[in-house]
Image (tube, rainbow, N blue to C red):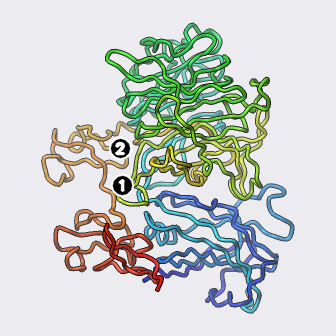
Amino acid sequence: MKLNQKVSDPTVPSGGSPVPPNPDGRFGGAVDATIKPQIVYPNHGVMVPPNLGQLEIHFLSGASTNTLFELQFSNTITDVRVYLRCYLPSGFTPPTGAVPAGQSGCIYTPEEKVWKFLAESNRGGQPVRLIVRATDDSGSGKVGVSDPISLQFARAEIKGALYYWTTSGGTGVMRYDFAGTGAATATPVLRASNVNTSVACVGCHALSRNGKKLVAEVNGQNDGRLALVDLASFNSATDKVNLAQSGTKLSNFESWNPDGTKFVGAYADSGATTYNLKLFSGTDAAYEGDIPNTGSNTNPANHPDWSADGKTIAFMSMGRAGTNQRSYKGAIKMVTEKTGGWNEPVTIVPSQTGVNRYYPAIAPDSTFLVYNESNCPTPTTETNIDCNGDTDPSAKLWAAKLEANATPVELANANKGGVMDKGETKLTNSYPKWSPFVTRGNAGDTSRLMWVTFSSSRKYGLRQPVTATGENPWGTLLWMAAVDPDKVGSGDPSYAAFALPFQDINTSNHIAQWASYFVSNGCLTESEGGCGANGATCCNGLQCVQLNQDPPIPCDVAGACVCQAIPQCAPSFEECSAAAPCCEGLRCLDNATGADCSGGSCTCTPPCSGIGQACGGASACCDGLKCVTGTSGSTCQVDIR
């Protein structure tokens, strides 16, 4: 059994014609390598969340005689073909030199139904092969066939709110709700105009994990004044906020503890009086004291990150003092909690001549971190732009376990550019931050998956970041990559990265901080009571339920209502029932009878099972595969008879 779908894209290019009737019959000509199209985005080996929805596909048309194109998505359970013309989004022109002479650049965004065909049938499953075929409209012309790429759909959807700093509109912090159902665009949450004191910009920021509080630094280097915002009540269209502590210079980079009661910061710029990590109240940003021995005037502390379990703070220790944005020869260190305080700092990755290490970000399972590493052109010029702790071109992502003298590993797949980068390795892969959730991976019941976001100056297929001046000729856009946490320490745990589609690509975007929920208009987060009959609403992605019912039911009883996560549809081979439905494209089948679920033991079953997936009973193997019984049960394998 296969999911077979053929779809004609309804978009008609300006001055062009629609896809002709029965387009599949026009690709019968001989294959000709001289007219082959080329896929230039996404990157080969990418993994995307099934609710991304807007993954653009960029390709070059091949010969000018190619007028009709077929995108073929296939594996053992999928054969989805989209027929389309070559066109570009309205108002977009590829940069000079991006499209070879005699060819055209093409960008296709799947319709919702096409995306569902692909994502819901393949989430958590085997990779999907994508090729582009090209021909003319005659039905007798030659056919060009692109080199294939592979893409995968993660098992679990990604949730939470993402907040990032943009240089557009007077600079400020934007946010996007991954659990939202509205327009797939980011919206402003804090601009310089939202601060009562006149400031030029609002940039570096940190979110409490539940999404209720935001702290942001104003004006960049040598300033250190903070704006503390209660997002539950703040209206970005009308409200203004005072600078914390009457505008005292406090910190340039911050991170929150798990319950949002305090944050840690660092300040080593002009006017600094202490160079340790500093603790602040999450209520009013009052200074509560230093973490001893974490910094000095020659080796200041920088870039703190507080773990999700609250037990560890990782930070950069400057090997050569500078400002918080311009620091050099950094080491990655950590402090761990003890009764009434913190243990002495431990070095995870040491300082090294000719290298700068900075921006640690602890993974959501609190067992390892990612960080940035830049290479200095020569050991004696560590103040060079290709070595500092800002947007230097040589920045790459590395991972290390949270232990003394850890062995780092490069996130080579995430660091790698795409076709349009043409081998360039200096891609400014900087500012790594984690989605707060650990989800189930694609490699079995015990596999795990996490997501890391970062900024990069790489080409977004036929698109490219804005040009810039100063230390880097290019601005940066936000990218995201899947990470298998169980591979840390044994090889590259990362997948190829993809660009976040909701960002404004006509600006430079940085520091994609995460929160578990998109908090606004007084909404309540998980496990908070007072919703329903009391008038308060739950934040997006949560529902108001009555906990003294089993299972919990929608609540309108005053004093008995709590916000809880909305149950997600069950993916392939997970338990299901009438109250816990399967994701689209799957059937909830009774394990005993193989019929539609009627008992208490049911499983979400795909149309057919791919290589390594469970089979037997109502779950047949896809074409060409055989159901083989092994020590861990029956799985589909290649039939070698």
- Residue 292 or residue 437, whichever sits in front: 292
Q: Give the residue number, with chain letter if any, for mark 2.
A: 539
Secondary element at image label 2: loop
Please name the amino acid that badge 1 sits on.
Answer: Thr
Screen quadrant of the N terminus: bottom left
Q: Which residue is drawn at 73% across and 69% down?
A: 38
Q: Position of residue 566 (x, y in %)?
A: 31, 52
Q: Where is residue 487 in the image (x, y as percent from the top left)?
A: 49, 49
Q: Which residue is drawn at 75% across and 66% down?
A: 105
Q: Is residue 505 above or below residue 623?
A: above
Q: Give the residue number, with chain letter if any, for mark 1.
A: 446
Q: Residue 59 vs residue 628: left or right? A: right
Label 2 crowd (10 A; few <14 / some 14-19 / many >=20): many
Q: Is residue 625 above or below residue 214?
A: below
Q: Residue at x 41, y 57 (%)?
A: 156
Q: In this view, does 28 lie above or below 175?
A: below
Q: Is residue 116 above or below residue 214?
A: below
Furthest residue in direction bottom, as rendered = 140
Q: Looking at the rendering, which quadrant does residue 523 occupy?
A: top left
- Dot 1 and dot 2 residues touching (CB under 8 Å): no
